[in-house]
Image (cartoon, rainbow, N blue to C red):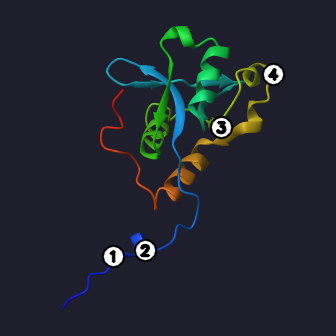
Amino acid sequence: MRTERAPWWETKPPSGPIPTTRWMVARAGEGRLEPLCVQAGAASVLPVFSFEEEAQMFLHLGGYADSGWRARESCTGELVSVLLGPCLDVEGVALDPLPEMLEDGTIGLVEVGRRRFVGQLLEGGRTASWCKPGAFSF
């Protein structure tokens, strides 16, 4: 009789937090996803939210709701693709920002550098699945 063992990555306990679903604000562009990047002083940042309600609040309070923008659930793989693709020029990611933070200059309190954020997503993605099939459809 032969016993099969699970690969080490299925038996090893996670060493860090497992990535959760995140939300961004986006709209359908010309055949591709167009994420909302906002200006924070001289820098451009991508707002990312922990909950759909926070993204919806940002849309409405920031005046983006009537311009085709909507809250979009995003998995780790999609966020990495966005930050290494269409948002390659952003300097950071704003975590759960309020629209007023753009005006009063406090956005830096919730901002993480783009490279650091991508690194954290990739590090956490070792133990969790990145996306469900079809997750990139808009």
Quadrant in the rendering for residue 105: top right
Mark sitting on residue 95: 3
Q: Quadrant of the C terminus?
A: top left
In the rendered structure, the answer to whether residue 57 lies left or right of residue 109 reads left
Q: Residue at x 47, y 37 (%)?
A: 74
Mark 4 vs 2, N-terminal side:
2
The kind of residue on which mark 1 rests is: Ala
- Discs 1/4, front: 1
Q: Could you give the CA–CA distance between mark 4 and mark 3, rounded to whole angstroms?
A: 16 Å
Whether residue 98 sits left or right of residue 90 in the image: it is right
Numbered disc 1: secondary structure: loop
Amino acid bearing label 2: Thr
Say what secondary structure mark 2 lies in: helix
Q: How far apart are the two marked residues, 4 and 2, measured between alpha carbons?
A: 48 Å
Nearest the viewer among 1 and 67 is 1
Residue 11: mark: 2
Q: Which residue is mark 1?
A: 6
Q: Quick one: SS at disc 3? A: strand
Q: Residue at x 57, y 25 (%)?
A: 37
Q: Look at the image and tell me in which quarter the N terminus lies.
A: bottom left
In three-dimensional space, the C-alpha distance between marks 1 and 2, rounded to whole angstroms, equals: 7 Å
Task: First in sequence, mark 1 or 2: give its number.
Answer: 1
The disc placed on residue 104 is 4
Which residue is pictured at 50% across the width and 32% down the height?
87
Mark 1 or mark 4, which has the lower sequence index?
1
Q: Residues within 10 Å of mark 2 (few under 14, many from 20)?
A: few
Upstream in sequence: badge 3 or badge 2: 2
- Taking the image as shown, residue 125 lies to the left or right of residue 57, namely left
Q: Dot 3 surroundings within 10 Å: few (below 14), some, or many (20 or more)?
A: many
